[in-house]
Image: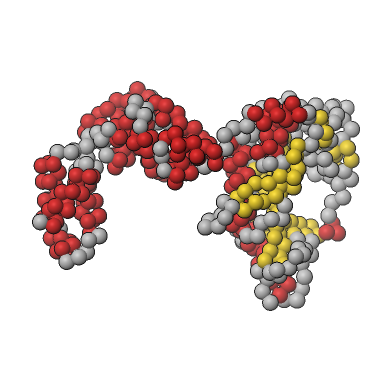
Amino acid sequence: MRREDWDKWLEVHAQMKTKTKAFCKCSTQFHSSPNSNVCPVCLGYPGTLPVLNEELVNFSIRMGLATNCKIRELSIFARKNYFYPDLTKGYQITQFETPICFDGFININLKDKEDKRIGITRIHMEEDAGKSIHDFHDDETLIDFNRCGVPLIEIVSEPDMNSSEEAYQYLSKIKQTLVYLEINDGNLEEGSMRCDANVSVRLKGDKNFGTRTEIKNLNSFKNVVDAIESEKKRQIDLIESGDKVYYQTMTYNAKERKTTAIRSKEEAHDYRYFPEPDLVKVRVGHEWISKIEKELPEFPEAKKIRFVKDYLISETDADELTQDKVFADFFESIARQLINKSGKSFRAVANILRVDVKRILNEKKISLEEFHVSNLIIAMIADSVSAGNISATASKEIFNLLLEGKTEEDQKNIFKKAEESLSQVSDNSEIELIVKKILDENPKEVERYKIGEKKLAGFFVGKIMQESKGRANPKIVNELLIKNLEA
Ligand SMILES: [Zn+2]
């Protein structure tokens, strides 16, 4: 008996990019020194009173609208009571029975399949706890309270996902939406998104879910995928050996690639939720909601269609550029700087961003924000490529040189010099000399080409471009190569 079908739902905790905390005026800055962003309210001193940050409500509604949720006009906060050293209040302020957003969905893209709709059960507002740091000393735990009271939204999905691939696509879409809305920085390493995954297995065709387990605190997409796969295997093995799955809270050890139980149902917390008496009810009228709706940004799908229409770039290019809002904005800022605003120039910009810029970001392991070649310089390169002054291959060489320049003025000078020395050779006789030289140097390959190995043309083009240091006009190279080979 093989259990193939399985189900899960995901809970995502996303940190909101508000300037101040959920219920006090402390800063939410990530790299502050430990215990510097704290006050009596977020440390939970007796007698202090929380005041709700309006921006947290705005951000939650934004996410709700972007994920097709209904917005609750009257919602309340609740106290979730539990003790933990990094939660000095002894309770967390969250929403329980009346989340501000509910009943929504998003569509995820799956490879070679139709888009799939994943239901969003609810989105609610809450505060984060402090951070216990166990790995500084062997016998001591340090506590940093800076994270206490940092605003979060929790996004809970329906159990609509049937593979770890679907879970991955779902998380990617949630992250993309949060970043597009500018309410979360998408920085998983700094913990601005954390995920709990509920996993159960059932026989193919079975309508009822099996007993689920919950894997807590997964902090990367890769860990979510791996943890789900490990847990799925553990549950199937259990059932097939005649045992059964118990409802448990699990933790995932990425080193051992294993899930292990940390709590059983008998030990499950009873949080004794009750309405938070220190906060008023949250009332958001139609006007408030429709104001936020009007200010929603253009989302990737719409942006992609507009890029193809306005900039005449390919659908593949538009798709890649709009995946990341920072990249899409950068593309448009370069497009505005172009002297020659034609499809050819826009396509050159797309190509430079996808090939040269991405290569440098990968090599140097930096983000686009840390990339210091300005939109104006990239526009100059693209104009030069589209005018035929330099080849697309030469732009790679130019970028390597540009990284040496510290200021925009330096970079302009570097570019102008490089443009001169790398300017494309379109002079037929000069190129023909190189073609002849390469053919003379590779007589065996010429022979093989002549008896039918036509794909060797690429080999010769590569050699010729190398010899010309990327300067030969590729179109002329191709023409002259074929002419000389077929002669
Ligand atoms: Zn505070």
In the image, is 308 to the left or to the right of 135? left
Residue 421 % position (x, y): 21, 33
In the figure, 250 relative to 180: above or below? below
In the figure, 235 relative to 106: above or below? below
In the figure, 290 relative to 481: above or below? above
Residue closer to the observer: 431 or 18: 431
In the image, is 192 to the left or to the right of 241? left
In what quadrant of the picture does the C terminus appear?
Answer: bottom left
The structure residue drawn at horizontal position 50% and vertical position 39%, both measured from the top left corner, is 305
Residue 36, image quadrant: top right
Q: Is residue 190 visible?
A: no
Residue 274 % position (x, y): 89, 40
Residue closer to the observer: 171 or 63: 63
The colour scheme used here is secondary structure
Q: Is residue 477 visible?
A: yes
Residue 4, image quadrant: bottom right
The structure residue drawn at horizontal position 68% and vertical position 46%, both measured from the top left corner, is 105
Extreme residue toward the top, this view: 409
Residue 81 % position (x, y): 85, 43
How many tags in the picture? Answer: 0
Residue 175 % position (x, y): 61, 43
The structure residue drawn at horizontal position 22% and vertical position 56%, both measured from the top left corner, is 457
In the figure, 453 relative to 386: above or below? below
In the image, is 155 to the left or to the right of 323? right
Residue 226, image quadrant: bottom right
In what quadrant of the picture does the N terminus appear?
Answer: bottom right
The structure residue drawn at horizontal position 67% and vertical position 31%, both measured from the top left corner, is 293
